[in-house]
Image: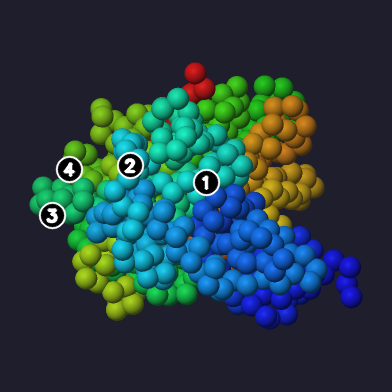
Amino acid sequence: MEQNKINLTIDNRPVSVEKGTTILDAAKSCGIEIPTLCHINLEGTCVNNHPASCRMCVVEVAGRRNLAPACATACMEGMEVHTNSLRVLNARRVILELILSNHPHDCLICPKSGNCELQTLAKKLKIHEAPYEGGEKSCHPVDKSVSIVRDMNKCILCRRCETMCNDVQTVGAIGATGRGFDTTVGPAFGLKLSESECTYCGQCVAVCPVGALTEVDNTGKLIRDLANPEKVVIVQTAPAVRVAIGEEFGYPAGTIVTGKLVSALKKLGFDYVFDTDFAADLTIMEEGTELLDRLQRFLSGDKSVKLPILTSCCPAWVNFFEHQFPDMLDIPSTARSPQQMFGSIAKTYWAEKMGIPREKLVVVSVMPCLAKKYECGRDEFKVNGNPDVDYSISTRELAALIKEANMDLASFEDSDFDAPLGASTGASVIFGATGGVMEAALRTAYEVYTGKTLEKVDFTAVRGLEGIRQADIDLDGFTLKVGIAHGLGNARRMLEDIRSGKSQFHAIEIMACPGGCIGGGGQPLHHGNVEILNARQKAVYVEDMNKPLRKSHENPYIKQLYEEFLGKPLSEKAHHLLHTNYFNKAD
């Protein structure tokens, strides 16, 4: 017998698992489902929450007087576990009824209705009455920020959000305070999210099993704009959206629905449907040129050069370093995110070509990220109070709007994005996965730096789902050291190495969310299933492979933009429209 193997029985079935495996995971391995509310485990991304606080997963263990929480109890040799005894079933029902006794019964108007784990469990356990009604209930004010709505009246104290914010992302914006009915999970000292260090990454929303944390819904505003004949409403869609939105319509995870997505957006009434991928190619031109400029100055002996350069595409990550590392604001690239580059070009270059006044043009983005809602409202991305991107909706919001319009995504034929802001290369679509921005930059940086054609464009060394990765890239004799991190906890480790002088990297890509944008806080909920992230990531690279052009600097419309309008990368005009500054938010 293998020394690390444990043999036990679960519901009279023999099971053999690794030493240290919990009863919950052991049961899952043999197809036995145990209900949970607080537990979540996203393998390979450090997301593992098992506080045993909800007690829904209790099981009966022979020889043990009390019921045991399956998520926090390790398997032992010879253990006999029963997940379906009458004692267990009765305990789960009572626990759920007690949870419901302190929960609002406004399911009809709750944003999470239909995708609420508490609601699903109540249905499964056939809870049709509320025997513990009549007692005191929590009464907390609703906290609505620009990106996230926090309603602690619906919180079941599962602590998933706390684990995500503190242990995984290391942001520390929320924690548990108070006792009894006064217990809340949120910023300290009764602060609002907007007053805290919250980055708006939305990972707390993605793991919340109920309606305590939801995104700010902008679909009502969008419908009003689409119905307004005085407005020209255009839309940009992020690369990660096309490989995930199909899940909301019954497609397997990772199904690419780009053409159908374009058709649906046109059917909804957008005047023009463009692609954020166009702006991703533009980002590579600016950010890649900035990288090469710093690198060449560094190699020539300029001691003032700040390396490593850090990517700046992710607004949650930007918010994180502004709050947590304000002494390092001169290290990240000054390039705006693709969302904001698109808005700036749309409301200048494109609007001028089309003869559309800025105040009449509404730019909407469809994003996998809730921090994009926050980014739209940053003052530096406005002209006389008018935002470059008026507002953002999430992948989930768009799916809900398509359903509200009584449309089925599967019924649409494929359509193409509108020109010129819809043209893109394969380098831009891989922005959706961790490592993608770095790989896209390398494809262009190699050719610009060496003057040689890059025959093999796949830099597989920077791909994957490991939290921190590194690679040495040969630029015709010069070794470029690059790093990649996804998840803000991993980002913190890399930033602390830079601060202490330990980092040897020349360039680092950072994404706030597990898996990058494919795992964004606005994506269809994956409920801890890492296979979904793997499928989305694979689809991003398939989309890249299918593109006729796979290097950003080969995009003919990007070339045209520089020739007609911007001049060259890092020009004064490009810097004004496509770059930004960062601010100390630690005070």
Q: Which residue is mark 4?
A: 360
Task: Give SS at disc 4.
Answer: helix
Residue at x 56%, y 73% (from the top left corner): 85
Whichever of labels 3 and 1 marks the residue nearer the N terminus, that label is: 1
Question: Residue 126: x percent and y percent?
Answer: 37, 70
* Residue 167 on image: x %, y %: 61, 42
- The residue singled out by tag 2 in the image is 136
Kind of residue at badge 4: Lys
Q: Which residue is mark 1?
A: 159
User: Which badge, 4 or 2, is on the more N-terminal residue?
Assistant: 2
Residue that lies at the very extreme toward the top in this rendered image = 587
Q: Element type at marker 2? A: loop
Locate residue 151: give its quadrant: top left
Question: What residue type is disc 1 on?
Answer: Arg
In this orientation, which residue lies closer to the viewer: 463 or 94? 94
How far is the residue under mark 4 from the one under mark 1?
Answer: 45 Å
Say the numbered circle drawn on residue 227: 3
Residue 383 in sight: yes
Marks 4 and 2 sit apart, C-alpha to C-alpha, by 51 Å
Name the quadrant of the N terminus.
bottom right
Mark 3 or mark 2, which is nearer to you? 2
Of marks 4 and 2, the one in the foreground: 2
How dense is the environment of label 1, judged by Cα within 10 Å: few (below 14), some, or many (20 and up)? many
What type is the residue that disc 2 sits on?
Glu
Looking at the image, which residue is at 13% across and 54% down? 227
Q: Position of residue 359 (x, y in %)?
A: 19, 38
